[in-house]
Amino acid sequence: MKVLATRRYPGPALHELADLEIAPLASLDAPRPDVEGLVVANEPPPLQLLPSLRVIANFGVGYDRIDVAACAERGVVVTNTPGVLDAATADLAFALILAARRRVVEGDRIVRSGGWTGSWADSGFAEELTGSTLGIVGFGRIGAAVAGRAQGFELRVLYTQRHEVETELGEYRELDALLAESDLVTVHVPLTPDTDRLIDARRLALLRDGACFVNTARGEIVDEGALVAELVSGRIRAGLDVFVDEPDVPAELLGLPNVVLTPHLGSATRQAREAMTRLVVDNLLAIERGDPPLTPVLSRA
Ligand code: 8YV
């Protein structure tokens, strides 16, 4: 099976594909009837140029830029990489929670700029993490992994998602109540038509003064303009790994002390990324053998 991958995905598993071509989608300008498998990182596939396509293996759990309904109509299987990146993403959410809450990056800047003159800080105290209330928006695999880590920090955990679940890890709240009651809010829902701008200006205004908002999911889940306005006002703090127009970040954020910015690093550990490639390849090999894919995604239509 001829497989086209949009980049050299990390790890050794990719070498198991016998007939592999690496090419960015932008370089495809004519039909490629030879290609039966496509590996993308949440990039919109040019279905019209790939008439023999059998499978799209997405490198990532989120597949919001892939038209799964159109693929299903064409009989193209779509797979993703759930599970293997939960720990890495939950760890990064906690890194951002800690960094934003405890003013770690601000402190780093003070040290580097020679502004650390006293023997200890006697003002500008951070708020404590231990004992505070963490609101988790989306209680799937990654949200639950965040809740597990929260126990070590003695956090009170609230969660919201479409349906209340049986769990010892947190208490269910409706989204608005969760936003109003939390000191820290972290987002772990997939981007779908239902979650696009789920956290709009009205909902951002429900956050407590001084609350810390963390997003490692997708920028579009929040009204980014409204979030920027809240951050510019200094009313809340944030740790942001995802943005609406990546790699562009709203310019207003770049000089703000109350926001920590990372370049979509959620799954960017060697272990997670190599396991993602492993799962991509295992899905492709399954399709090639005529077996069912390991981790297919279902059309939401
Ligand atoms: C990206 C992600 O796929 O899994 C997801 O949904 O956003 C990430 O793992 C990865 O950064 C490659 O673009």
Image (cartoon, rainbow, N blue to C red):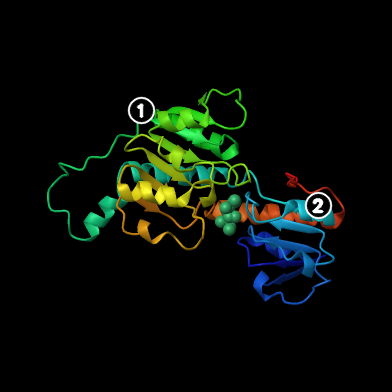
Residue type highlighted by circle 1: Gly
Where ligand 1 lies, by quadrant? bottom right
Q: Is residue 273 visible?
A: no
Residue 1 x, y percent position in the rendering: 82, 65
User: What residue lies at 51% left-to-right and 56% top-to-bottom?
Assistant: 244
Q: In the image, is 18 to the left or to the right of 196? A: right
> Badge 2, how many Cα within 10 Å: few under 14, some, many 20+?
some
Q: Which mark is residue 198?
A: none
Q: Earlier in the sequence, mark 1 or mark 2?
A: 2
33 left or right of 109 in image = right
Classify 34 as above or below 38.
Answer: below
Left or right of 79 on screen, residue 115:
left
Q: Is residue 185 above or below residue 50?
A: above
Q: CA distance from mark 1 to mark 2?
A: 47 Å
Residue, disc 2: 72
If the image is split into quadrants, where does the C terminus sit? top right
Callout 2 amino acid: Ala
Instruction: Check the image and name the residue furthest to the right.
Output: 290
In percent of width and height, residue 92 lies at 46, 47
Q: Percent from the top left, x then y, of residue 216?
A: 50, 47
Can I make out residue 175 in this image? yes
Task: Check disc 1 and report its element: helix, strand or loop.
Answer: loop
| Observer-nearest of 284 and 52 | 52
What numbered label is drawn on residue 131? 1
Q: Residue at x 78, y 62 (%)?
A: 37
- Farthest left residue in view: 118
Residue 133: percent from the left, percent from the top?
Answer: 40, 29
Category of crowding for the residue at label 1, using alpha-carbon neighbours closer than 10 angstroms: few (below 14), some (14–19), many (at least 20): some
- Left or right: where 54 falls relative to 187: right
Residue 76 in which image quadrant: bottom right
**For numbered disc 2, what is the local secondary structure?**
helix
